[in-house]
Amino acid sequence: MQYQQYRLAGWPRLSVACLAALALSACGGGGGGPNGEFPPAGVGVAEVIVEPIVEWDDFSGRIQAVNTVQLQPRITGYLDDVHFEEGAVVAEGDLLFTIDDREYRATVASQRADVARAKTRVDLAEQDLARSEKLVSARAVSIEELEQRRGEVEQAQADLRAAEAALDVALLNLEFTRVTSPIDGRVGAALVRPGNLVTPNGSVLTTVVSIDPIHVVFEGDENIYLKYQAKALTGERPSSRDVRNPVRVGLAGSQDFPFHGEMDFVDNSIDPATGTIQGRALIPNPDGFLIPGLFARVRLLGSGEYEAVLIHEAAVMTDQDRKFVYVVTDDNVALRRDIVLGREVEGLRVVEEGLSAGERIVVNGVRKIFFSGAPVAPSADDMRSPGSAPQVQVGSEG
């Protein structure tokens, strides 16, 4: 029993020794060099990039038309004809629908006749007043009769104005039999066909949406709003209420942000139900590619310009919850350096803590390094695209 316990207690120590021996023998029969040392690992190294950047914050949003119009008739009548191709681009003032106008033309003719009669009554009343003014000096007409003639003139003039107003209404209703586009944009489907009765506030004829420019609407939470307010107070980043901060927009299925615009609205309150505030940007859309309802990935300027240390993601290793890289010294030794990463900027990662300008790190072959302090055989590489640069050996800079 005592012998068995001794064997069990010594097993870990024996195992470590055996494993070390096996590892040495497996790596070249007792060592990679004449002295049993491992050859330096060949790795690609690059100097960290230091350049001025700005940060961008990402949001999800929807494309909306700047102007959306639901066309409804202003008069009652039977739809006579449709004058547009559904889905076509139309200009302001283009004729879209006509409503049977015969009844309205007759009304206009009747109102014009009423205006002519009213003008005749005015002329007669004015003539009677002129005669009475001449006769009153000869005491052939009483003062009371003269005042009556003046009242008749005023009454006739009022009747004329009423007849002219009624004619204006009749002409307006006749104009409403021609339904035109109120904006430049793209017209939708004709929702009512010729022969159907249309009524004000009861029939939607079609919709027209503006094309260029177009809006993208998105929402941010309270934290992002407070962040922007704090930056505005310190002058680091102006508020989008005061300055048209730049915006980039991408669509579903693409990682690019090809559409560029600027902020034109921030809401005046936070929605207590969602804890978000709405923002809106204006995007040029000359070719009409963007249409209302599209999902949009929105990237809004999130900071002022500052100098940042940038590295490629390929150089970063993970040790539980810590991130680290291998810094190559002047005598070609790779030393572990813990870092704090920031956001991604144009394919690179911002290093908030741990690295400074002029330092070289391993960007290609980092998994060949098994411990901090290992010797390496560095070759120059490209930080923006590790592995793409020609392998040129770099010697000690010491």
Image (tube, rainbow, N blue to C red):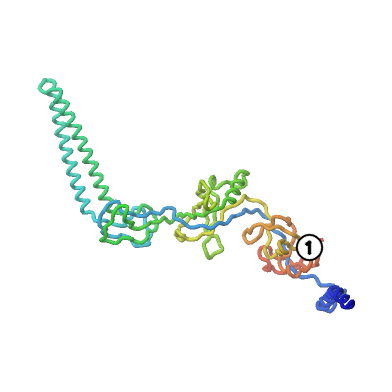
Q: Residue at x 71, y 68 (%)?
A: 364
Q: Residue at x 56, y 54 (%)?
A: 300
Q: Residue at x 17, y 41 (%)?
A: 116
Nearest the camera: 313 or 14? 14
Q: Residue at x 33, y 60 (%)?
A: 191
Q: Note whether 196 is above or below 43 in the view shown.
A: above
Residue 366: x and y in percent read 73, 67
In the image: residue 200, left or right of residue 375: left
Which residue occupies the extreme front position in the image? Answer: 1
Any part of residue 359 in sight? yes
| 10 Å crowding of disc 1: few (<14), some (14-19), many (20+) | many
Q: Quadrant of residue 28?
A: bottom right
Amino acid on which the number 1 mark rests in the picture: Leu
Residue 387: x and y in percent read 68, 68
Any part of residue 17 in sight? no
Residue highlighted by disc 1: 335
Residue 323: x and y in percent read 71, 61
Per the image, label 1 sits on a secondary structure element best described as: strand
Quadrant into which the C terminus falls? bottom right
Which residue occupies the extreme right position in the image? Answer: 2
In the image: residue 56, left or right of residue 38: left
Residue 221: x and y in percent read 56, 52
- Give the mark count: 1
In the image: residue 197, left or right of residue 302: left
Nearest the camera: 36 or 318? 318
Q: Quadrant of residue 190?
A: bottom left
Quadrant into which the N terminus falls? bottom right
